[in-house]
Amino acid sequence: MDIKFSTGRHTLTIYLCGELDEYVADNARQKIDDAICQPGITTVVFDLSNLSFMDSTGIGVLIGRYKKLKARGVPVCVKNVSEPADKIFKMAGLYTIMPKVK
């Protein structure tokens, strides 16, 4: 899994590339937590265009980051959702807490 970040206009975009599963979850969790702690972030967007696979552990990683950000009043959304990720998001009902944006 490769994770990249970009910041602009107080929005942190997190690019998840590869597979988000139990083998990379701890590392992904730590990298994302480090990035979302930056001061001045008012929105977080997960770009899932290159996410090829996500299991239940990956869902847990995203929900955990959502909860941390929600506690700080920071909205979370997703964009460019790959087909495999879209299926998981629909099945798990994740779009209700992390809406899809363009």
Image: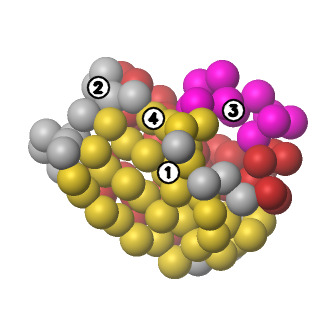
Tell me, for residue 46, which label it has, or none: 1
Label 1 – label 4 distance at C-alpha: 8 Å
Magenta-colored span: 89-99
Label 4 – label 3 distance at C-alpha: 11 Å
**Residue 15 colored in magenta in the image:** no
Tell me, for residue 72, which label it has, or none: 2
- x then y, percent, for residue 24: 61, 71
Question: Which residue is disc 4 drawn over?
Answer: 76
> Who is closer to the viewer here, 43 or 59?
43
Label 3, residues with CA under 10 Å away: few <14, some 14-19, many ≥20? some
Q: Disc 1 residue type?
A: Phe
Q: Disc 4 residue type?
A: Val
SS assignment at label 1: strand
For marks 3 and 1, the one nearer the N-term is 1
> Who is closer to the viewer here, 89 or 63?
89
Q: Quadrant of the N terminus?
A: bottom right
**Residue 92 colored in magenta in the image:** yes
- x then y, percent, for residue 45: 44, 46
Question: Which residue is disc 3 drawn over?
Answer: 94
- x then y, percent, for residue 40: 13, 40
Which of discs 2 and 1 lies nearer the camera? The answer is 1
For marks 2 and 1, the one nearer the N-term is 1
Against 82, residue 36 (above or below) is above
Q: Residue at x 48, y 64 (%)?
A: 15
